[in-house]
Image: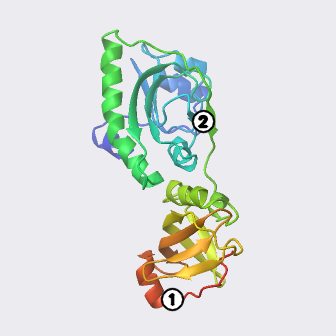
Amino acid sequence: MKETAAAAGIPVCTPERVKDSAFIEELKRIPCDVIVVVAFGQILPREVLDYPRYGCINIHASLLPRWRGAAPMQWAILAGDKKTGLTAMQMDEGLDTGDMLLKKEVDIEPDETGESLHDKLAALGSGLLLETLSLAEAGRLEPVPQEGESTYASMLKKDMGRADWGQDAEKIERYIRGLNSWPGVFTGLRGKKLKLWRAAVSPEETGEEPGTIVDVAKNGFTVQTGKGCLTLLEVQLEGKKRMDAASFLRGVSVEKGEILCL
């Protein structure tokens, strides 16, 4: 956006803190009908919120009030939600607490990843924004206060990706998808980091310790978890490229009974 604006001769400000008085003074020298906010990691002060004619409008990647906060797309997958979407919101001084203006709903597919969901919602976001601005200009927006239970979608951290084989196979599989592509879910194989890109859940129980490889087949290898098993279908060994498990197993001899840990 900055490069496009600069090429068009549009001034670009990049304040470290949006609450700085110098930035607010600079902003108020610009005739402004509306401020649009997308993926901006700071809370706008009241002085900024009240400045534009139509206030500040945010496109938030959740069906509010379900997920507020920094990583709503990923947390929707981690939690096993079946649907999510976008909400155009009139911003206030809270964290994603403003009145809702418009929504677009999408299904979370069984193989949905954090990356694919991001791309899906990004493709819808511009249309939702333009529709919201058109309705605002026509005076046809009907703000709806947020009601019902909300959940905080905290910022993703690298250590969230460490595979806990004591958890249910279904939960681990959701984390593999939801944390794709960052930070990704990882474990260890013979002292090396093994990143897990794709897996399938099996309800079978083997009685083995969680983290134990219980089966090695042509197209994948299966690990016992705290509940059920997980067949790893796409992996990446430290220092190697990402590959399907069949290709991986042709180059690395994985043995039944080995334990994955890091």
Residue 169, percent from left and from top: 60, 61
The image shows residue 163 at horizontal and vertical percentages of 64, 65
In terms of depth relative to the viewer, which is nearer, 204 or 252? 204
Position above or below: 3 against 61: below
**Label disc, if present, on residue 17 of the rendered structure:** 2
Q: Position of residue 92 (x, y in %)?
A: 57, 20
User: Residue placed at 41% from the left, 20% from the top?
Assistant: 34
Task: Report the quarter where the N terminus lies.
Answer: top left
Image marks 1 and 2: residues in contact by CB distance under 8 Å:
no
Query: Mark 1 belongs to which amino acid?
Result: Val
Q: Label 2 neighbourhood size at 10 Å, few (<14), some (14-19), many (20+)? A: few
Query: Could you say which quadrant of the image residue 85 lies in?
Result: top left
Residue 213 % position (x, y): 61, 79
Q: Which residue is located at x 46 percent, y 90 percent?
A: 251
Looking at the rendered structure, the number of numbered marks drawn on it comes to 2
Which labelled disc corresponds to residue 252?
A: 1
**Within the image, what quadrant is residue 105 found in?**
top left
Mark 1 vs mark 2: which is more N-terminal?
2
